[in-house]
Image: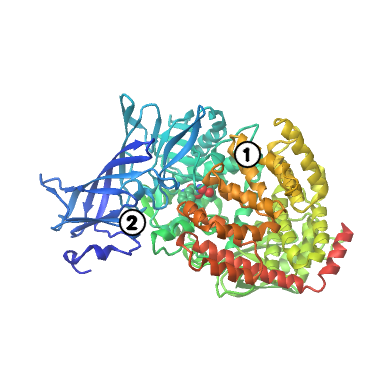
Amino acid sequence: MAKAEQQSVEDFKGQARLPRFANPKRYVISLRVDLARCAFSGSSTIAVAVVSSTRFLVLNAADLAVDPASVRFTTPGSSEELKPSEVVAVEEDEILVVGFDTTLPIGDGELRIGFTGTLNDQMRGFYRSKYEYNGEIRNMAVTQFEAVDARRCFPCWDEPAFKATFKITLEVPSELVALSNMPVAEEKVNGVVKTLSFEESPIMSTYLVAIVVGLFDYIEDKLPDGTKVRVYCQVGKSSQGKFALDVAVKSLQLYENYFAVPYPLPKLDMVAIPDFAAGAMENYGLVTYRETALLYDDRLSSASNKQSVAITVAHELAHQWFGNLVTMEWWTHLWLNEGFASWVSYLAVDSLFPEWKIWTQFLEETAAGLMLDALSESHPIEVEINHANEIDAIFDSISYDKGASVIRMLQSYLGAESFQQALASYIKKYTYSNAKTEDLWAVLEEKSREPVKDLMNSWTKQQGYPVIYANLKKHELELEQAQFLSDGSSGTGMWIIPVTLCCGSYNPQEKFLLKSKYHKLDIKELVSSHDPNNENGERFWIKLNVDQTGFYRVKYDDELAAGIRYAVQANKLSLMDKIGVVEDSYALSVACKQTLSSLLFLLSAYGEEFDYTVLSHVIVISCKIADVVMDATPELANDIKLFLINLLLSAAKKLGWDPKDGENHLDVMLRSDLLVALVRLGHEETINEAVKRFNIFLNDRNTPLLPPDNRKAAYLGVMQTVSTSNKSGFESLLRIYTETDQSQERVRVLGSLASCPDKEIVLEALNFLLTRKVRNQDAIYGLGISRQGRETAWVWLKENWDYISKTWAASSLISRFVSAIVSPFNSSEKAVEVEEFFASRVKPSFERALKQSLERVRINAKWVESIRGEQSLADAVKELVHKT
Ligand code: BES
Ligand code: ZN
């Protein structure tokens, strides 16, 4: 566009980003909230700097009724107010175009806008949540602005790089608590309403602005410098906030140290919100959470609940620096926010709870990232965004898990200390500003003098990751890299891979950057320090990717694989390496690069394993194998399940059902996972015991025989025995669901209901999710559907699609419905059927999830075929069962 004068409203349509001829500097926002009518009205006075010649101001607004007559523009020097000649809301682009007759003067000005809106029920923008107080249902008003929903509360330049200060004033009922990012500066009570004006914030992005209005209790603690930290929750529940408060205070101090910048705001509030789409949201100084992610009750929460609270709090508080103080320049760099907050949260939790071995547990995140990124329908970490409606979909395992994993890889390559120093200078350099991925690399490169940019570009700009094929030829190790894809094909990607390896022991190790496709390595020296024909009968082994710090897989030749299996069985490997070995083997098997028999044979080496961190992976893999063989080779399924049960049984027997006094956290989690797995694998003894203990629990909710950690297993066990002719267990669970006011307990119950083998019960369970008894935020937990219920669930999804898409589309939870119900299928006919159904229904909010799910279905189908064609499987299974 050559001249501003030639522009019209049309020119601003269909653009990914706002035009840059004016920047907001300061927002003065007043909102009057009417909770009874679920409505609000407000005004926004925005100080803007006009930086280039324009007749238009273009900003974001959506679902707001802007009063055109209220819109004014003034400039400091002149007493004259400019009235716009047009005020056009372009709905599909969520923009508000304010046009004037004359060109605006370059320099400062002030834009004033009056508007009204409704508190929606979609858990985004400015919305209402419901809670019970003294037996009465009440409304609260809450904001959730990330990624692009601040525009649903007030007109604004709703992009992360348009940072400005915010001065917020709220008019609310006098008896309620009203919170925002900053502390209250002034409060005026006028009968039944009060006006609260909050202090002006430092400059920040719109997606981090927050408001909460409702009835709450709180508990408080302070940082050494006096900064108040509070947890707000439902009246009467404040003791459940203690654990999170403690984690918050400690992790804030840890981050102040780590980033070498003090927490920048005068207070930090954390609030439990009864209806909440995400898990938690890092709003500056006012972090909001699902109840399950913030509250911890000694008597009612499980060890795994405790861990999630710690991780979530540590994650959101990490954002106060990484994200809030230094913000991504655009959503393409979302991973800078999410990947880093995830990675740093493990650092904090490791320091607070070293006995949790949280860095070993981190490999679950890496596993999730590797799993998703092995799809052709994955995306690069740095992803192009062409429209605002594409942003929600990238809050996925790539941004979070792959993002965090490649950071771990880089840290391990550069060394912890130099990495921290570089991060601290990055934070300092970009404080109150925005940064792109390459800005971070530049700082790291300067500090470390390593080729960080080239190395990392290969991981963040291209999708996927490599598998390294390792072949031993005498004293030479031949390495070849190729892109790993779960469908068995090889992509064309090439990476700069920080390779590490060790032979026969962890000391010494070999480290280098693999930059080419092929590489030969003379390992004579490494080997000679280890006599291959050791008289103790020790075997020679080589492990690549030591402690799984690299984001890649390894496929060993037969001889090396035998060595690795030996090393697992003889307990020569670190926990992380034991996890890596079985994860890679599983993924290679799914991709048909390795037989199921060889995976089962490897698994048999884990029979003496007692560590939670390792067994949790073995368990997930075992359950997936059990599922696939039911379809692939039903005649072998029982034997394979028997083998898997035996594999887990020695650990399960050792732990039993009853917790021991003073038992460690990881054993508690292990017991819980083992019992769940044994139920899933159909172990009758465990199912019977589950039912027995459940019945005792029904009569005495405080019985020590069924602590919260074991309830998931008990509920799943009960659902295994439920059928249309014997529904009492199902009905009891529904009763527990409606009676409890503890959200973690509700999640456990929901997670069990549809696991029933009886299809009619599955249907009842799914229909229950659509009733008013289940909050919209929680329905996703009910999608753990039995294999037998797969088809029923698909028919249910189709029949209820209009309602489901209407109810869950805006919060983007809709993608969870699609992937939970579609991805378990394993035939190409089904993939076609699903495609046909969605052809006319697909929307950007779940398009990616749908494509990924369909790809999974096709991968499953291939895997099933390959298992069917595996000639020696029956013999291998017979032998394995015989041995155990
Ligand atoms: N910034 C996100 C919340 C979010 C997610 C906003 C998706 C908009 C769309 C927050 O920091 C976050 O990552 N929350 C996680 C929890 C965390 C422990 C990984 C979540 O909500 O699951
Ligand atoms: Zn986050």
Q: Nearer the viewer, residue 801 or 205?
A: 801
Residue 199, position as x, y percentages in the image:
32, 35
**Circle 2 residue:** 94
Earlier in the chain: of badge 2 and badge 1, it is 2
Left or right relative to 613: residue 19? left
Left or right relative to 399: residue 185? left
Numbered disc 2: secondary structure: loop
| Residue at 68 percent of width and 59 percent of height | 580
Numbered disc 1: secondary structure: helix
Q: Are marks 2 and 1 in contact (CB under 8 Å)?
A: no
**Badge 1: few (under 14), some or many (20 or more) residues near its Cα, within 10 Å?**
many
Residue type, label 2? Glu
Q: Is residue 86 above or below residue 301?
A: below
**Circle 1 residue:** 737
Q: Is residue 471 visible to us here? A: yes
Residue 497, position as x, y percentages in the image:
58, 66
Q: Quadrant of residue 586?
A: bottom right
Q: Quadrant of the N terminus?
A: bottom left
Residue type, label 1? Tyr
Q: Is residue 541 visible to us here? A: no
Q: Nearer the viewer, residue 606 or 371?
A: 371
Left or right relative to 759: residue 832? left
Residue 502, position as x, y percentages in the image:
70, 61
